Amino acid sequence: MTHRPLPCFKAYDIRGRLGVELDEDVAFRVGRAFAAVLQAQRVVLGRDCRASSQALAGAVARGLMAEGVEVIDLSLCGTEEVYFATTHHAACGGIEVTASHNPMDYNGMKLVGRWSAPLDPATTMQAIRALAESGGFGPEAAGKVTAAPETRAAYVDRVLDFIDIAALRPLRVLVNAGNGAAGPTFDALARALAERGAPLGFIRLHHDPDGSFPNGIPNPLLPENQPATAAAVVAAGADMGVAWDGDFDRCFFFDHQGRFVPGEYVVGLLARVFLAKEPGAVIVHDPRIEWNTLDTIARMGGRAERARTGHAYFKRALRDTGAVYGGEMSAHHYFRDFMACDSGMIPWLMVAELMGRTGQSLADLLAEARAAFPSSGEINFHVPDPAAVMARVEAALTGAEVDRLDGLSMSFPDWRVNLRASNTEPLLRLNIETRGDTEGLTRRVAEVTRLIEGG
């Protein structure tokens, strides 16, 4: 096998344009290299519903089997089901073939090791890349594929362990799977909830998996994708809306008025839930937007720990600190008792339970935080040299407390800005927050935007 450069390897996962950076040969190489570097005997494999995912997953399976691996094949599933199954089946690692929310001409893979632990970007991921690029494999062995149809039921049981079904009150929930992988897994959860007497009713939107994505790429974080869910919530008279991305490891919320809930407020809400159950616990958060989260953790008597954006960094932080929960404003939510991994199904169930316990709407639960700590939401810029832009912004905004854990964070008494280059896309991302100053937020966004654009 000849040497082949593989630019599809990113900081902590694999993403690439189909036919250019990622194809079945690459997938085969990744499977072999993953098994060889991890010295794996058993690996869990799943895929999303993209048109290319089944063929790529088949190539990964062939690569794994060429190293003598038993492949536990979950077929169509979410990334978090691979995380769960890797530990549930005592596998040596897990691979989900998915491009999540990336454009139609992309695909990729998310990788974990034994006990669903993240792979170190600087060592293990680089070793897998180096071997996959070189093609320096030994003789082929003969592995096998094993189906595991009982895995989803076990996954459902684990997810439902996070809530007290007796605390739920009747709610109508609008769910939008975006024609991604979420639909079948959600249906399994909904059936189990009904069997246990949960008083929840569901309205399904864009529910069936369809790799052509007739209603657009499932990325609810994009403003242009939010009106469909918002309108459906209002039209149905739902108490809450939930939308998922393509592999449903992220979920997004809409209140009963159809208003989108920025992810940083959900982090504060879930931190509140966990600290009420486990006083003094550690909560991990990212540094892009943090003031509301820090305020919640302080008031609830918890301990805050920061981590760089990205699932590998967050999973490591949860494992290192013993944190009960970690949340990114991008809607990745991580749970100690879910292998320290992220889930897009656990958060909405926990919010539904909180609504039941308090008798408050989602809008009421968030009203104080939204007023006290207005934020811009993430604003993306295509720039040729992100480092130069960040240097220009830092030079122009003087008198700040500067932090470089994740990009450039600059804190002033009444407002705060974070700029960081994306780990997965050619973008510079801007986030700004203030202390109760909505007008000031608008002004600061305009000011920093001018600096970014060279004005």
Image: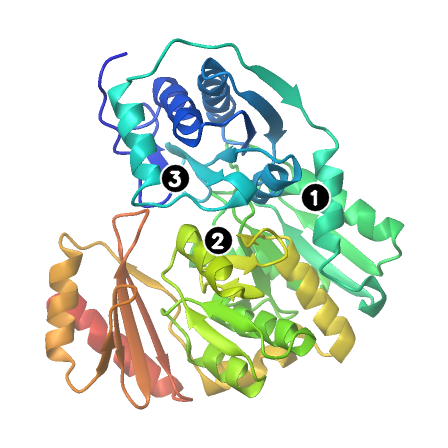
Q: Quadrant of residue 373?
A: bottom left
| Earlier sequence position, callout 2 versus callout 1 | 1
According to the image, label 2 marks what residue?
Answer: 225
Which quadrant holds the C terminus?
Answer: bottom left
- Give the image location of residue 185, x and y in percent: 68, 41
Relative vertical location of residue 97 with respect to residue 281 in this rendering, above or below: above
Q: CA distance from mark 2 to mark 1?
A: 29 Å
According to the image, label 1 marks what residue?
Answer: 155
Q: In the picture provided, is 22 more to the left or to the right than 403?
A: right
| Earlier sequence position, callout 2 versus callout 3 | 3
Q: Nearer the viewer, residue 278 or 401?
A: 278
Q: Nearer the viewer, mark 2 or mark 3?
A: 3
Q: CA distance from mark 1 to mark 3?
A: 29 Å
Kind of residue sitting beneath label 2: Asn
**Residue at image location 47% in from the left, 49% down from the top:** 219
**Residue at image location 72% in from the left, 65% down from the top:** 237
According to the image, label 3 marks what residue?
Answer: 103
Kind of residue sitting beneath label 3: Pro
The local secondary structure at tag 3 comes to loop
Relative vertical location of residue 238 with respect to residue 409 in this rendering, above or below: above
- Give the image location of residue 438, x and y in percent: 39, 85
The local secondary structure at tag 1 comes to helix
